[in-house]
């Protein structure tokens, strides 16, 4: 049994890079959608403080994935 089978983690750099790229794309879409929704809610006068906090968490996750991609490259 190899490390990946034992840990359940695939250490293949190409596979890892593909997974990270897919995650980055997903986060980009979520960030764009969230920004648009927050903007619309602000215009309508809604309290968006919780949405903004969550959006910033997603942004931090996005930045971390981008750093991991840079290291994997």
Image: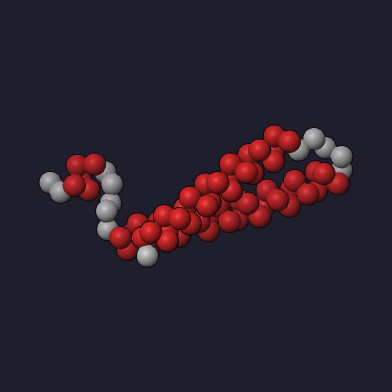
State the colouring used for the structure image: secondary structure
The location of residue 37, given as percent across then percent down, is: 74, 48
Residue 21, by quadrant, is bottom left
Q: Quadrant of the C terminus?
A: bottom left
The location of residue 38, given as percent across then percent down, is: 75, 46
User: Who's the residue at 27% across and 53% down the image?
Assistant: 11
The location of residue 29, given as percent across then percent down, is: 60, 55
Total marks shown come to 0
- Judge from the rendering whether residue 46 lies leftward or rightward of residue 33; answer left or right: right
- Judge from the rendering whether residue 4 lies leftward or rightward of residue 54; answer left or right: left
The location of residue 14, given as percent across then percent down, is: 32, 63
Residue 58, by quadrant, is top right
Answer yes or no: is residue 52 visible: yes
Answer yes or no: is residue 20 visible: no
Hey, which residue is sitting farthest left in the picture?
1
Residue 26, by quadrant, is bottom right
User: Who's the residue at 80% across and 43% down the image?
Assistant: 41
User: Who's the residue at 87% across and 43% down the image?
Assistant: 44
User: Who's the residue at 30% across and 60% down the image?
Assistant: 13
- Judge from the rendering whether residue 17 lies leftward or rightward of residue 49; answer left or right: left
């Amino acid at each position: 049994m190899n490390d990946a089978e034992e840990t359940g983690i695939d250490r293949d750099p190409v596979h890892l890079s593909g997974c990270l790229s897919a995650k980055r794309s997903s986060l980009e879409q979520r960030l764009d959608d969230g920004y648009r929704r927050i903007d619309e809610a602000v215009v309508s006068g809604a309290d968006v403080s919780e949405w903004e906090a969550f959006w910033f968490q997603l942004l931090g996750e996005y930045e971390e994935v981008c750093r991991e991609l840079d290291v994997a490259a």
